[in-house]
Image: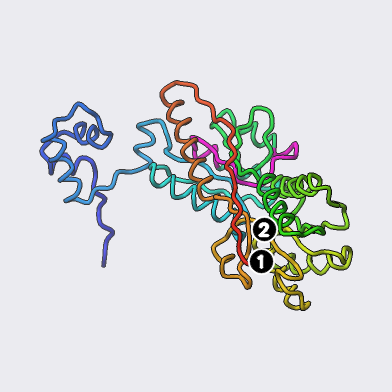
């Protein structure tokens, strides 16, 4: 009958190294009051015994959980997946554990708040798309006494720290590029217009057309849901309500893939009959047929930046100091390929 091996304790390490448990604790916590020879002996004992400190015990001693909460959703889309990947990478490098909470509906908020408070997270990164309802604001008021909150890719409100990509500028770059290529009847397939990012991309489309004195009417706009299928439907709807269409700005690359497929089905040559520009610069966009012109937004870098900012604020709080997160917008850039 097999038995579970006994967990190596700090006392086992102390006995193996010939020192006190307090000395081992000092080495584990990088205390300066330990000689180099003793530190080396303890570290050798830790390696030989394969000792792994208990994260729970260390958090009780330090009165800090070492944990950052992340509230997010939509991982089946490229943008949110990249954002979370950047958060995870930087958290690992800085020694933070993540408490991920998936919110798909406002009814999830009470559960999420209760879990994050119970786990004593030291900060919260809000990567869920929006902050619009009274219920959401109440959720944040519930969290604020316990941990600082940093918001990603949403409209800034009073007293809220927001990091984002300049979606409006990115859309304007895309449409200005189409205008420079001689296109005059430029349609738009948006993401869900309840989302700030989709609203900003529509505003950028309007900015560029208005600046060039070109039409920008409701006939030229169709709303999608970020999926390739909605891009396919969107192009067909645009052509019905705006037959003179000669170019389309699509608010993400997955919908742009659907546009390219629909154009092929309808016998439209891209870019000769119809120019197409997307938004995201997902890696596969370079392999679309034709390769997709798109706006690059570095959401992986945004996720990393969010963790670095949260790390700075939490460490300041631990030291009894005040630290604020300054709002920041990363700048997108246009990647020109064959589709335009």
Coordinates of residue 336 in the picture (x, y in percent): 61, 59
Coordinates of residue 54 in the picture (x, y in percent): 33, 43
The mark nearer the N terminus, 2 or 1, is 2
Coordinates of residue 323 in the picture (x, y in percent): 50, 25
State the residue at coordinates (47%, 46%): 98
Q: Report helix, strand or loop for mark 1.
A: loop
Whether residue 330 is visible here, answered yes or no, is yes
Q: Quadrant of residue 186?
A: bottom right
Instruction: Answer few, some or many: residues within 10 Å of disc 2's Cα (few below 14, many 20 plus, some between 14 and 19).
Output: many
Instruction: Answer few, some or many: residues within 10 Å of disc 1's Cα (few below 14, many 20 plus, some between 14 and 19).
Output: many
Name the foreground residue: 261 vs 142.
Answer: 261
Q: Which residue is mark 2?
A: 252
Q: Quadrant of residue 339?
A: bottom right
State the residue at coordinates (24%, 34%): 25
Q: Quadrant of residue 125?
A: top right
Name the foreground residue: 154 vs 138.
Answer: 154
Q: Which residue is mark 1?
A: 339
Residue 208 drawn above or below residue 320: below
Over which residues does the magenta segment extend? 116-136
Residue 122 drawn above or below residue 49: above
Name the foreground residue: 14 vs 275.
Answer: 275
Q: CA distance from mark 2 to mark 1?
A: 14 Å
């Amino acid at each position: 009958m097999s038995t579970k091996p006994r967990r190596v304790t700090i006392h086992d390490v102390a006995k193996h190294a010939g020192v006190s448990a307090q000395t081992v604790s000092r080495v584990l916590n990088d205390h300066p009051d330990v000689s180099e020879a003793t530190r080396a002996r303890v570290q050798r004992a830790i390696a030989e015994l394969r000792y792994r400190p208990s994260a729970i015990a260390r958090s009780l001693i330090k009165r800090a959980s070492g944990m950052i909460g992340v509230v997010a959703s939509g991982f089946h889309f490229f943008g949110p997946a990249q954002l979370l990947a950047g958060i995870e990478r930087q958290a690992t490098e800085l020694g933070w554990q993540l408490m991920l909470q998936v919110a798909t509906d406002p009814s999830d908020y009470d559960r999420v708040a209760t879990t994050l408070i119970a786990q004593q997270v030291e900060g919260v990164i809000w990567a869920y798309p929006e902050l619009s309802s009274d219920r959401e604001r109440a959720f944040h008021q519930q969290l604020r006494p316990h941990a600082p909150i940093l918001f990603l890719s949403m409209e800034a409100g009073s007293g809220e720290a927001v990091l984002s990509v300049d979606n409006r500028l990115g859309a304007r770059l895309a449409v200005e590029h189409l205008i420079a290529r001689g296109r005059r009847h430029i349609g738009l397939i948006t993401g869900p217009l309840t989302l700030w990012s989709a609203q900003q991309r529509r505003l950028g489309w309007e900015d560029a057309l208005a600046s060039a004195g070109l039409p920008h009417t409701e006939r030229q706009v169709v709303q999608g849901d970020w999926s390739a299928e909605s891009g396919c439907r969107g192009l067909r709807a645009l052509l019905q309500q705006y037959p003179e269409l000669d170019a389309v700005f699509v608010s993400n690359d997955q919908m742009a893939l659907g546009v390219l497929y629909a154009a092929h089905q309808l016998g439209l040559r891209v870019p000769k009959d119809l120019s197409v520009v997307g938004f995201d610069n997902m890696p596969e966009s370079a392999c679309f047929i034709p390769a997709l012109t798109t706006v690059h937004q570095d959401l992986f870098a945004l996720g990393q930046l969010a963790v670095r900012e949260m790390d700075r604020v939490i460490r300041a709080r631990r030291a009894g100091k005040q630290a604020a997160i300054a709002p920041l917008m990363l700048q997108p850039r246009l990647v020109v390929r064959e589709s335009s």
